[in-house]
Image: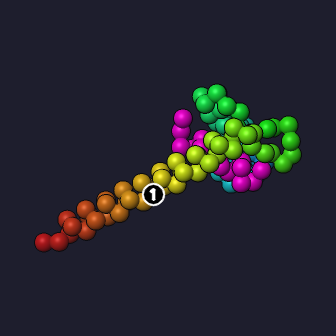
Amino acid sequence: MLLRQLEYVLAVEHFQSFTKAADYCCVTQPTLSQQIRTLESYLGIEVFDRSTLPIVPTDKGILILERAKSVVKQAHELEDFAKEIAKSAKDAELVY
């Protein structure tokens, strides 16, 4: 499971469209769809009901999306924190 895959499912949830989500994520629609299928296969859960327009999550997908939001938020917070630490370390090196 990749963070990027979680970001893709969140984009589909937001835009309710694989095409719009792919545009937003700067990937092709087949790439985004394949990555989401790979994630669904890994999890053993179909996240989206693809028979409806707009695209909606399945009942189990709703639960996965809730958790994915938390994971992605924490990952971005960790990235920001790491950048702060790296910047602080560089600033400390400049002090004589």
Q: Tell me if residue 34 can be seen.
A: no
Instruction: Tell me the quarter of the picture where residue 50 sits.
Output: top right
* Residue assigned mark 1: 77
- Say whether residue 18 is left or right of residue 51: left
* Residue pictured at 78% horizontal, 45% vertical: 56
Please identify the quadrant where the N terminus is shown: top right
Residue drawn 86% across and 46% down? Answer: 53
> Helix or strand or loop: what does disc 1 sit on?
helix
x and y percentages locating residue 37 in the rendered image: 68, 32
Residue 38 occupies quadrant: top right
Q: Nearer the viewer, residue 22 or 59?
A: 59
Q: Main secondary structure of the magenta part?
A: helix
Q: Is residue 66 above or below residue 31?
A: below
Whether residue 77 is visible: yes
Residue 84, image x, y percentages:
35, 63
**Residue interval drawn in magenta:** 1-16
Give the image location of residue 78, x and y in percent: 42, 54
Mark 1 is on which residue type? Glu
Dividing the picture into quadrants, the one containing residue 6 is top right
Q: Nearer the viewer, residue 61 or 83?
A: 61
Image position of 24 (left or right of 72): right
